[in-house]
Amino acid sequence: MLDNLQYLILVTLSFLLFVAAVWGLVDALRYPDDSYRAAGKQSRILWAALLGAATLVSFLLLGGGIMSLFGIASVVVVLLYFVDVKPRLEQSGGRGRRAPASSPAAGDRRPMRAVLQRASRASVTVDGTVVSSFDRQGIVALVGVTHDDGPTEAETIARKIAEPAHPR
């Protein structure tokens, strides 16, 4: 009876390790390599390889062999990813452009945004009065600002508008 219970516990732990390893692997692959550098962690490729190996080992040990040397190493890799690496990746900016668009939680800071569009003519009207316009080739900038944005954010966005990353 006790042997059956022990076997059931080991099989359950092996299954949980496999699920956590697959989850960790998929999650690690969703972060761009820049996030790993920004977090001060090893590269995305290394973590994908480690978690891939942990996934493979945990799959092979689904029969309850989690207490082997390879099983324990897999547990260490998966725990290290979820306890140390993943929180640092989230602190350092998350998944970058791949993150789903959602409203920020209280205290979260989203960067100021700007959209540039070439135009042959444009005007800005405030309360029925044209305050600015042009009638020849130019660029229209739509800038999103919030009450929390200050001079540092304004300087950064102005520099990005003046020197776009992909000029044409």
Image (tube, helix red, strand yellow):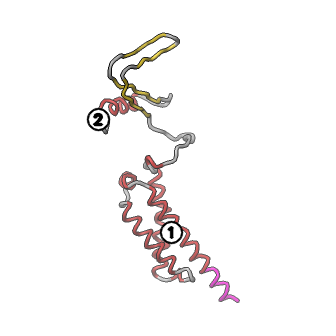
Report the front residue among 76 and 104.
104
Q: Residue at x 44, y 46 (%)?
A: 97
Which residue bears the numbered disc 2? 168
Secondary structure type for disc 1: helix
Residue 158: which quarter of the image?
top left
Asked if residue 168 is positioned above or below residue 70 in the image, the reply reads above
Number of the front mark, 1 or 2? 2
Mark 1 neighbour density, 10 Å: few (under 14) some (14–19) many (20 or more): many
Q: How far from the left and from the top, in percent, is residue 117?
A: 39, 29
**CA separation in Å, label 1 and label 2:** 44 Å
Task: Point out the image quarter for the C terminus.
Answer: top left
Which label is found at residue 162? none
Task: Kindly identify the residue that appears in the image at 65 percent across and 89 percent down.
Answer: 3
- Element on which disc 2 rests: loop
How far across and how far down the image is residue 58, in percent? Answer: 51, 76
- x 35%, y 25%: residue: 139
Q: Image quadrant for the N terminus?
A: bottom right
Task: Please report whichever mark, 1 or 2, sits nearer to the chain's N-terminal start.
Answer: 1
Residue 159 drawn at (x, y percent): 32, 31
Specify start and end residues of the magenta stretch as a single range: 1-10
Please say if 119 is above or below 69: above
Q: Main secondary structure of the magenta part?
A: helix
In which image quadrant can residue 50 be found? Answer: bottom left
Q: Which mark is residue 21?
A: 1
Residue 95 highlighted magenta (yes or no): no
- Is residue 93 at all visible to an observer of this figure? no
Mark 2 is on which residue type? Arg
Rendered position, 150 above or below 15: above
Tell me which residue sits at (43%, 55%) in the image.
31
Q: Can you say whether 22 is above or below 65 in the image?
A: above
Q: Amino acid at mark 1?
A: Ala
Q: Are marks 1 and 2 in contact (CB under 8 Å)?
A: no
